[in-house]
Amino acid sequence: MATIVISHIAADGTLVDGDTEKGDGTGDILKRYGFRWFRSIRQYGHPNSRDRAPRVVAIEAAADELRAAGHTVDVEIAEEVRPNDVVRADKHERLEDRREALAAKGDKLTREADSLMRASDAMVEHLPLGQPVMPGRRGRAHRNLLERSVTTAIRSAQTAEAARQMPARIDGSRRAEAYKERPDVTARRVERLEAEQRALQRRMDGLAAYPSANSDRLRRQYEGEMAVLEERIAGDRAVLDAAKEAGTFGRYSKDNVHRDDQVRIRGQWRTVVRANGKTVSLTTGYSWTDRYGWEEVKAVRCEHAQDTPDS
C-alpha cells in the first residue's frame, strides 16, 4: 500500500505526494473530494488552492478514506497567510512567465508556418504553370500532389493565424492584470470580501451554537478562511489609502457632488439625480436611473467642484 502525504502550503496550495500507482484506487478517492490531476507537476491537488485557506474538511475526509483503504496518510497543513504584496508579486511573476511562454509559442508557430508554406511550394515547383491534370489513373499522382500542396498551404495559413493571435493574448493578459489593480476595482473587491467575511462570521457563530460531527474540522477551515480574508482586505485597503493620498481615488462623494451636476463615468458625461452614501444615481434618458459607485466618478462639472475637468 502507498504512503501518502497531503500538504497545504500557501505558496504551493494543496498537493498530494507519495508512491501511488495507477489502478491502486487512490485517484478515485481523491477525485471524490475535489482533487484533480495536475499534469504539469504530475501530482494531485486542489485547483486554485494557492494562497487560499485549506479545505480542511475535504482533506481530512480524503485522508480518512485513504486510511480505510489501507494506505498510510499524513496530513500537513501550514497556517501561514502570505502578505498581499507578496501574493501580488508572485502572481505577477507567474503571469510574466506565461506571457514569455506565449511569445515563444508565437515565434515557434511563425517558423512552423513558414516551413509549411515552403514545403507546399516545393511540392509543386517542378510542375509547369497551367499544366492540366490528366483524367483517371494517369493523373492520380498529379491530383494527389496538388491536394497535398493545398492541404499543407491551408495548415500554414492556420498556423500563421494562431501565431498572429499571440501578441493580442499577451496584451489582453496585461490589460486584465492592470484592470484588477485599478482603485475602483479594488474598492469593489473590498466590498465583496467584506460581505464574504460577514457571511463567514455568521457560519462560525452558527457552528458555535449548533456543533456537529465535523465541528472541529469546520472550525479550523473557517478560521483559515477568516485569516485569509482579513489579510486580503487589509492589503487592498492599504492600496486604496495610498491611492487616496496620491489623489487618484476617493476625490468625489455626496459631500462635493450634487443633484443636476455633470459627472464623467466610463467615458461619458451623465447628469446626477441623487448623491448617496456609497453610490451616485444618474439619468438614463428613460424612466429609470443607473447607479454607480463613487470610485467610478472620474470628473465633475459643478460650481462646487474644486477641480475643472477637461471636456
Image (spheres, rainbow, N blue to C red):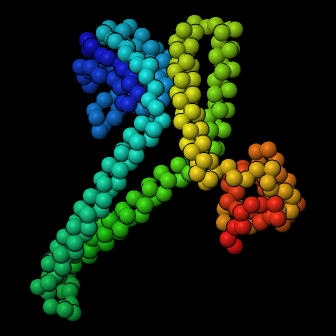
Q: Residue furthest bottom?
A: 130
* Quarter location, residue 257: bottom right
294 and 78: which is toward the camera: 294
Q: Position of residue 188 (x, y in %)?
A: 64, 44
* Quarter location, residue 170: bottom left
Q: Position of residue 227 (x, y in %)?
A: 54, 23
On the question of residue 69 being in view, the answer is: no
Residue sitting at x 80%, y 64%: 302
Q: Position of residue 129 (x, y in %)?
A: 19, 92
Number of numbered discs present? Answer: 0
Q: Position of residue 221 (x, y in %)?
A: 53, 18
Residue sitting at x 53%, y 53%: 179
Query: Height in image: 39 above or below 280?
Result: above
Is the N terminus in the top left, top right, bottom left or bottom right quadrant? top left
The reply, left or right, for residue 76 in relation to residue 146 is right
Query: Height in image: 77 above or below 199?
Result: above
254 and 108: which is toward the camera: 254
Residue sitting at x 58%, y 51%: 246
Query: Height in image: 272 above or below 134?
Result: above
The reply, left or right, for residue 94 in relation to residue 145 is right
